[in-house]
Image (cartoon, grey):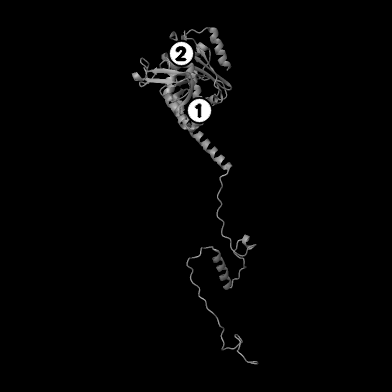
Amino acid sequence: MIGGGDTPRGSGDPGDSPDYRVYRSRKPLFRRRAGSDQDQIARLRGDTQRGSPQPADAGLAPERKRGRGLVPQAPAAPRRRRWTRGRVIRWVLLAVVGWVAISAVIFLVSAQIQQGKVSDANHLLGGAGYPATSPNNVLVLGSDVRTSENAEPGAQTTGNGRSDSILLMRIGGGANSRMGIARDTVVDIPGAGRQKINAAYSIGGTALAVQTIENFTGIDINHVMIVSFEDFPALIDAMGGVTYRGGCVVSRINGGFKNGGYTLRLPAGKSHIDGRQALALARTRKNDCNRNEDDLTRARRQQKIVGAMKRRLLSPVAFARLPLISWNVPKALRSDMSGPTLIGLFAALSVAGTPDTEILGTVSGQVPEAVKQAKVRRFLEG
């Protein structure tokens, strides 16, 4: 070789061999995750060495082929559905509808059970349309029959009893009027002669009471409701009580606490009362706060209780208790009406106002014909 010197490596001399360095790799301490960037790159290299060349960017996510190099994109995590205002409103509406539907079913079942208990006057009733759309005349009777636990001395505990309160309501189709009839009003009772009007229910039950009141007033009665004093407190308690507004009341039912009865004390103004207090208030005849009160005052007080119940039924508290109220209403207010008809009646009551209640009758029990006709006319026009 010209110029001498060492023979360069790789000059072709068969005795010479290339000088290589061998490196050994260690096993990884932790196994790589399937689908990691290193695994995908390793697979690409392996495929190339086996003679299956792949494009440099094969297997990589399209969005990573552009821009920042050939780094595979990890699979995106599933997106969570966000709670928007619209979704919350839809769920709330669905819950409200479900709550009302459950309460309606409970009400219909309870009404069906109670409907058969007021059937002796069915042949005298009817003749009006659906209460929500057509005027209906509804007779509400409160019997003075007591349970053995809350009976006053000498009070009746069996049979129908006398009608402790008598109220006529005209409701539905835009009509909205109330007329109470004093319990001591003297009238002609078919088959029993001339007596106080409250005796008709005791003598012949609902049928005779309906017939007597129709003959006396000339008003066709379409439906009847009987207030059960036995179940009335449970209904008030199911509502969470009611707020009563009125004058001072101190009454001693069954002789008051000293004699094993019940003493009611309410200050003048606004008071929140429970079921037992509401029942005692509705039954109060002698008020130690005002000894000049009479049965007409008592009838007006009962109407205030009805108005307080209506206000409570339209409150948010009542909505939360709706299933419990729905079960107790037909038990406390027994009626000839079916469940759907009762729903129509209460729907009409809920949208109507609370009119003043006309009282037909006097303490003496005698009602001039002209006065009666005028009050009946106003009732039918309401």
Residue 244 image position (x, y, % from top left) = 48, 23
Describe the element under mark 2 as helix, strand or loop: helix
x and y percentages locating residue 267 in the rendered image: 45, 20
Q: Which residue is mark 2?
A: 295
How many angstroms separate mark 2 from mark 1 (CA)? 27 Å
Residue at figure coordinates x 42%, y 20% from the top left: 265
Q: Residues within 10 Å of mark 1 (few under 14, many from 20)?
A: some
Query: Looking at the picture, how far across and down is residue 171, in whole percent?
Result: 55, 21
Q: As drawn, which residue projects farthest toward the left?
A: 259
Snapshot quadrant of residue 128: top right
Q: Is residue 237 above or below residue 192?
A: below
Name the quarter where the C terminus is drawn. top right
Give how far across and how far down residue 381 sits, in percent: 58, 16
Q: Is residue 181 left or right of residue 152?
A: right
Tell me where residue 7 sits by quadrant.
bottom right
Q: Residues within 10 Å of mark 2 (few under 14, many from 20)?
A: some
Query: Which amino acid, by three-letter code, is at mark 1?
Result: Leu
Give the amino acid at mark 2: Asp
Nearer-the-camera pick, 246 or 18: 246
The reply to whether callout 2 and callout 1 are in contact (CB within 8 Å) is no
Q: Nearer the viewer, residue 372 or 111?
A: 372
Task: Count up the numbered dots.
Answer: 2
Q: Is residue 228 visible?
A: no
In the depicted structure, whether residue 201 falls above or below residue 25: above
Q: Nearer the viewer, residue 186 or 150?
A: 150
Q: Quadrant of the N terminus?
A: bottom right
- As helix, strand or loop, the secondary structure at mark 1 comes to helix
Q: Is residue 102 visible?
A: yes
Q: Which residue is mark 1?
A: 313
N-terminal label among 2 and 1? 2
